[in-house]
């Protein structure tokens, strides 16, 4: 039996398909399933009003179902105008009874209307992917601050924004940087972003990667993943970096490293994954060759200087779904994917459920941790305890049927002593 509750979705009749896809993703999320089973029994979030600004995908739906199973009074909105899966949003509303405000392709006004609709729920806890809830609360919805226990942040860009708020001493409640857990950034960012980014580029263009030159801008965990997967497809990979240590690592991983302006004339496909502004800028776009593809897997489309691209072009047309062709005065054609928004969620389905299993296990346990420890925490950015991180890794290994060694008492004693020498 389905129920109908408030929300704003594209087409409620899509719910049955969304339900099937949510259940399919659940099969590959065993850690979150174990947490959900415990939450159903213990109800650790009972009655807590929660607001989530997340990518509305099948994996997020399984997190939402877990939080609701734990007793949370949850409402959701999208954290990007192009990342919503409309059938999933419909299913969340009509099948699972979770108010959801998300429509793929919504304009900026609708996007922020949805954020405010979620905040009208007067949340006690926030769950962000990009910091839009927290930033809105601290600017136009300050009336909510006193009622908020704390929040969680899913992604690198959001953590960067939060640290800025903390450093400027404007952050008013504690936030857990879920992104900084090892079982999140080492797997989600590397394996998830690596696979899903190339999946989206291939889906939207049908381009053959083998033999092409792929320029990866940024060599953090996401950049490592993208470069690795591009290399695995047979691409020639160039990495552009500003951090000397990461640049050195890229060199030793076997990639060419050079400034973006130099790489611009060589690349066939450009992928930005930094979280910074105008990483692909006008100087690069002026030098790109005929047919170049530009994509972004960072959270905001600010990574690409789209106004400069518009200025360089004499015409623009959509040649495929999620592919806009810009024609320069000299006849060159440059292609922007997914309007410069995070391509893996805009032009494909985002990360595989298997990797989001760990990321969202961190979110679920993080919400429980925040509820239990918020009174001890200052208005700062925190990381989940290491033992919680390792427990998620142990659960994942168990679900995969992988066994590992354990230290003997003698080995533990040795590692905790200082007396033994050469």
Image: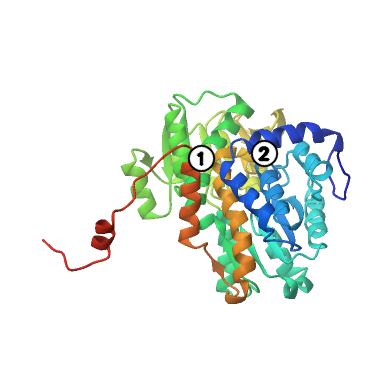
Identify the residue at image location x=62%, y=71%: 374
List the residue tagged with mark 2: 346
- Point out residue 168 in the picture as x, y percentages from the top left corner: 58, 74
Locate the N terminus by quadrant: top right
In this rendering, is residue 298 above or below 233? below
Residue 21: assigned label: none
Front one among 129 and 149: 149
- Which residue is the extreme one toward the left? 422
* x 69%, y 58%: residue: 43
Q: Which residue is mark 1?
A: 399
* Disc 2 + disc 1, Cβ < 8 Å: no
Q: Is residue 300 left or right of residue 3?
A: left
Left or right: 346 as drawn, with respect to 102: left
Q: Reading the chain from its start, which is encountered first: label 2 or label 1?
A: 2
Residue for point 65% across, 64% down: 151
**Cα–Cα span, label 2 and label 1:** 30 Å
Discs 2/1, front: 1
């Amino acid at each position: 039996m389905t129920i109908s509750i408030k929300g704003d979705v594209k087409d409620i009749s899509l719910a049955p398909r969304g339900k099937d896809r949510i259940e399919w993703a659940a099969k590959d999320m065993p850690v979150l399933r174990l947490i959900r089973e415990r939450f159903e029994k213990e109800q650790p979030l009972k009655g807590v009003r929660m607001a989530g600004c997340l990518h509305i995908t099948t994996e997020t739906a399984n997190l939402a179902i877990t939080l609701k199973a734990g007793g949370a009074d949850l409402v959701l909105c999208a954290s990007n105008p192009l990342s919503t899966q409309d059938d999933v949003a419909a299913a969340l509303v009509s099948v699972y009874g979770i108010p959801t405000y998300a429509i793929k392709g919504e304009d900026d006004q609708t996007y922020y209307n949805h954020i405010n609709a979620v905040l009208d729920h007067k949340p006690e806890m926030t769950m962000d992917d990009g910091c839009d809830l927290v930033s809105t609360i601290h600017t136009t919805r300050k009336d909510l601050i006193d009622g908020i226990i704390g929040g969680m942040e899913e992604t690198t860009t959001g953590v960067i924004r939060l640290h800025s708020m903390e450093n400027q001493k404007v952050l008013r409640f504690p936030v857990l940087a879920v992104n900084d857990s090892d079982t999140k950034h080492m797997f989600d960012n590397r394996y998830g972003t690596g696979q899903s980014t190339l999946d989206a580029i291939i889906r939207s263009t049908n381009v053959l990667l083998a033999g092409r030159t792929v320029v990866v801008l940024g060599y953090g965990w996401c950049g490592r993943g993208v470069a690795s997967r591009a290399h695995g497809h047979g691409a020639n990979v160039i990495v552009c970096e500003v951090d000397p240590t990461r640049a050195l690592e890229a060199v030793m991983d076997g990639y060419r490293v050079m400034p973006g302006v130099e790489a611009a004339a060589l690349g066939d496909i450009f992928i930005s994954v930094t979280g910074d502004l105008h990483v692909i800028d006008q100087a690069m776009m002026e030098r790109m060759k005929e047919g170049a593809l530009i994509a972004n897997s960072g959270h905001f489309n600010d990574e690409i200087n789209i106004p400069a691209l518009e200025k360089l072009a004499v015409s623009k047309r959509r040649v495929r779904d999620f592919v806009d062709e810009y024609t320069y005065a000299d006849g060159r054609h440059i292609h922007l994917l997914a309007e410069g928004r995070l391509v893996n969620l805009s032009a494909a389905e985002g990360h595989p459920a298997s990797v989001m299993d760990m990321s969202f296990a961190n979110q679920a346990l993080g919400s429980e941790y925040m509820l239990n420890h918020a009174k001890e925490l200052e208005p700062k950015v925190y990381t989940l305890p290491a033992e919680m991180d390792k427990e998620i890794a142990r659960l994942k290994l168990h679900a995969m049927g992988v066994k590992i060694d354990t230290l003997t008492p003698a080995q533990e004693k040795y590692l905790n002593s200082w007396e033994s020498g050469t």
